[in-house]
Image: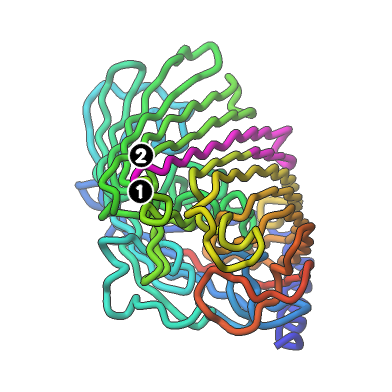
Amino acid sequence: MRKTLFTLSMVASQLLLYSVSVKADDQPAQGWLFDSINHNDYGISVSGWAQASVADSNHGQQLTPATVFRRTDGFTIDQIGIMLEKKLNSNLISRVGAIPVEMPKHFNWGFNITTMYGADNFFFRTYGLDEDWSFNKPGNFGSSDYYATLTQAYLEFYFPFSGGSNLMLGLFHTPLANEIGFALPNPAPTDFYTHTYSFIHGPAKHAGVLWSSYILNNPNSSKLSYELGLVRGYNNLQDINNNWDVIGNLRWRSQDFKTWIDFENIYGNNADDSISDCGCGSPIPTSSALAHDNSLKRFQSYLTLTHHFDEKNSVVAEASYGHQEKSLLADVFNAQPIGIPKAGGKNASWSGLNISYKYKFNPKVSASVRGEYFDTDGVNVMLPFSGSYKALTTNLAWTPVHYLRVRPEIRYDWYSGHAKPFGADGNYLPPLVHGKYDNQLSYSLDLTFFF
């Protein structure tokens, strides 16, 4: 496996050097394969992508939690996605914020239906919807276990008032966290193959409603927009506690759109919203029965600063914080004796800071580096142990043609705390509690084909 990965990386590096002098391919990354279909009178388009990878670490076997989505070593099909959509004509992108276009004067509507298949879909299943499909029953936690999901299915409406407003209804990827993607065309903004610890603590998707509108929309100044949402918790359609979570976000854009500030928040009762039978729902377990409390509140917040210095240089800094009443794992795995819930849960929190820098050598080649610091009381099935997790990640991304991205990546993680979170034996479902190391070096090569 390591020899295969090394060989592929060497080939990619040679091709990368060759491509430095090549001009950019200006065609769009997605939709070109369906060009004849996409030219229609209805504004409906079809597009897609397919991502596969090889990965390994200095320990082998289980790569999670360091690599988050990427579980075991070897080859995997990460994602195959098909998107059918009618894009909204608006001066806002829901879950993204203001864009530098004039305010449309007329009501219009759109929709998005996205389906996906692959190993990553373990994390994209929705409780009460696709988690119960026969082929989505979790076997083990290996990278050769593939799942299919109805990833998004929503209607969207534009209203020409309050500076421009959008209403989204249905199943959609979360507006929280910097690396979620999907609201923008691929490959933005997922500059890295692996993800951050703060990312995996947040929701992946919601069923509900999201309203987006402006507070300030003056063409000669900066822009400030907001989002308000009511959703059925984290990754749930059938919310067990039958309560709604509230989303409240603010998004500021400088007049030249070089600087973005995003403040994103979610709050609600999340008792029993982590479903152990399917390994789905929220990644932060609670138990109303053990806690003797049917209302176990969770709050999560992300503050992200993005600045584009020029066409080549950009930086992103993201701070995050979360708090869970009566977290089950903080009680079970972070006090002696381990494995026995002593108080039915423990009030627990987590916080993190991620900083990444991206440099574009030319339109086809870029390099990125990211540093992470994450401190947790141990609430997540992927990170059940309290302590401090740190990581450094770097990669090169090369797009030789508009429909292909090649990306070798290296990541080093280290942990300070009472446990050994890395290099677990076997591919059992989370929580991952049988690790043997307090550090890990991971490396991967992923190829994404856009169509």
Q: Residue at x 51, y 39 (%)?
A: 300
Residue 136 screen position, x and y as percent = 34, 75
Disc 1 packing (10 Å; few <14; some 14–19; many ≥20): many
Position above or below: 98 against 32: above
Q: Residue at x 54, y 49 (%)?
A: 346
Q: Residue at x 27, y 79 (%)?
A: 134
Q: Which residue is under mark 2?
A: 245
Position above or below: 32 against 93: below
- Residue type at mark 1 is His
Q: Is residue 311 magenta?
A: yes
Q: Which residues are magenta?
A: 294-319
Position above or below: 126 against 264: below
Name the quarter where the N terminus is drawn: bottom right
Drawn side of residue 230 relative to residue 276, left or right:
left
Q: Residue at x 31, y 36 (%)?
A: 230
Q: Secondary structure at mark 1?
A: strand
Position above or below: 44 against 396: above
Q: Which residue is under mark 1?
A: 206
Residue in the foreground of this view, choosing between 373 and 219: 373
Single out the mark in the foreground, 2 or 1: 2
Q: Is residue 260 magenta?
A: no
Drawn side of residue 217 relative to residue 330, left or right:
left
Disc 2 packing (10 Å; few <14; some 14–19; many ≥20): many
Q: Secondary structure at mark 2?
A: strand
Q: Are marks 2 and 1 in contact (CB under 8 Å)?
A: yes
Name the quarter where the C terminus is drawn: bottom left
